[in-house]
Image (cartoon, rainbow, N blue to C red):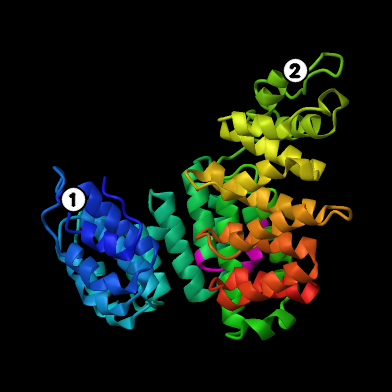
Amino acid sequence: MSQINSVESAITALGNNDPGVRYHAAWWLGKNRVGSAVKNLIQCLQDEGDQTSMGGYPLRRQAARSLGLINDISCTPYLLDTFHTNDIQLHEATLRALIELKTADCKDALNRYVDQNIEGKPMEALIETLTAYKMWDVKEKVEPYLHSDSERIASAAASYFYVCTGENNYLNKIHCYLNHSNRFVRQSAAFDLARIASITSTESILNARIPNNVKMHSLKSILEKSITHQSEDLDSSIYSLSGEQREIIKKLDNLVCENFAGNIVIDKASSPRTNGESPSPSKKISLSDIFDLLKSPSLSDREFGIDLLAFSRNFIHLDLSGLYFSESDQDVKVGLIKAITAKKDPQFLPALIDAVGVEIGNHCQGNIRRIASCALGEVGSQKYIEEEDIQIILEKLTWAIAKPDDWGLRYSACLALEKISNNQSRGMLSLAHGSELDTVVLMRINLALLNG
C-alpha cells in the first residue's frame, strides 16, 4: 500500500488504481481535517466506480464521513445528493456528516427524506439528525419510533422527545436502556445521553456496565456542551463552573487515570475462574499466577495482581521494566504499568516513556498511554527525584500535551504536569493553552494553571 503521511501524498493517493488506497487516503484527509481537500473529497463522494457486489459505495461513504469531520458547509448540496442513491450506509454516513455541519441548508432535504418510503432507512441516524437540527415539526412522524422493536431506535426517539419537551419520562426511558442485557444497546444509550448533554445522567453512565472509554466519551461530551452553552469565553467560564460541572471533571480525571478496562467491560464481581476467591495466601503465588490475575475478567482479580507486583515482598526485586518490554499481552502490559505507577520509582522510567510514546494500534495501547502519562506525573512529583529524570519526564509530557490526536492523552498529560507543579511544568501548560482546540482539554489546562 502507498505510504500516506502528508496532504500531498493523500491527495495523490485518491487517484490510485487500488480501491483500498483511495479509501485510506479519504480516511486520512478526514482524520487530519484537511480543509484544502474538500473538492477532492467531493469528487470521491460522486465516484461510482468503487462499488461492492451488494451495490454499496465504500469510498463515497468514507468521503461523506471525512467531509463531516472537516466541517466545510460548501459540501452540503453534494452530501444531500447521496440520498438519491440506493446505498443505505451512504445515507447514514451523510446524515452523521450533516450533524457535524450544523447548517440549516439541509432542513428541506431532511423533511423530504423523512417522507420517503425507503427500505432499511437508517432511522437511528435520521432521528439523531432531526434532534440535532431541532426539527420538531416532524414529531408526529417520529413518535411511532418510541415503540420500535429496535431499542436503539426507540432510545434515539426518546432523546428527540426529551430535547423537544424536557419531560423526564423520556430521559428515564433512555436510563432504562443503560441497564439493558445487550451491551450494544447500553452503549448506544450512553451515546444518546452524551448527545443530549444530560448533566444529571453522569452517575447513571458511570454505574452502567459499559466500557470505560464509552464513559469517558460520554462525560466529556456532556461537560463540553454544558461549558460551551454556558459561555464562549473559556478563560472566564472556569470561575463560574457549577458544582455538577466540577464533579464531572473529577470523575473524568479518575477515568483517565484509572482507565483499566478501556473498551472492555470488566466484571466488577468475581470471575468464574476464581469463584470469587483470590489465590489463597498460603499458596506460593508465581509470576504466572499474577499474569493470570491481570488477564482475568474480574476487576478485583486484576487489582490484586497489581498489588502483588507493586507491594509483595516476594516480588520486590522483580524487573518490571524488563517484563514490560518482553511481554506482548496488552492486559498484562497495562497491569505492569499500573504496578510501576504504584511504585513511583524513577528506575522504571524507560517503561513509562515507552508506553506513552507507542503508536495507538488498538484501544489497549491508548489506555496504556494515558495511564503511563499520569504515572509520569506521579514519579515527577517525588521530592527527591534527580534533575536528569525530571527533564526526561518533562520532555515526554511536552510531546504528550501538544502532539497526539488522542484528547485523552493530552488530558492525562495535563494532569501529570499539574501533579509535578514546578515552574517548568506550569510554563508547558501555558504553552499548551495557546494551541489547544478541544474545549474540555482547554478547560482542564485552565484549571491546572489556576490550581498551580
Residue 32 coordinates in the image, percent (x, y) = 39, 64
Q: Residues within 10 Å of mark 1 (few under 14, many from 20)?
A: some
Name the main secondary structure of what is drawn in magenta: helix
From the viewer's perspective, is 316 left or right of 256? right
Name the element at disc 1. Answer: loop
Q: CA distance from mark 2 to mark 1?
A: 53 Å
Look at 77% across and 27% down and name the residue there.
318
Return the residue found at the far front. Answer: 388
Q: Which image quarter is the N terminus in?
A: top left
Question: Mark 2 belongs to which amino acid?
Answer: Ser
**Quarter-of-image position of residue 144:** bottom left
Task: Provide the residue designation for mark 2.
Answer: 286
> Is 25 situated above or below 138?
above
Q: Does residue 52 appear to the left or right of 9 in the view shown? A: left
| Quarter of the figure with the C terminus | bottom right
- Name the foreground residue: 389 vs 92: 389
Q: Which residues are magenta?
A: 195-203
Say which residue label 1 marks: 56
The image quadrant of residue 28 is bottom left
Pick out the residue farthest to the top. Answer: 283
Residue flagged by tag 1: what amino acid is it? Gly
Which one is earlier in the sequence, the residue at label 2 or at label 1? 1
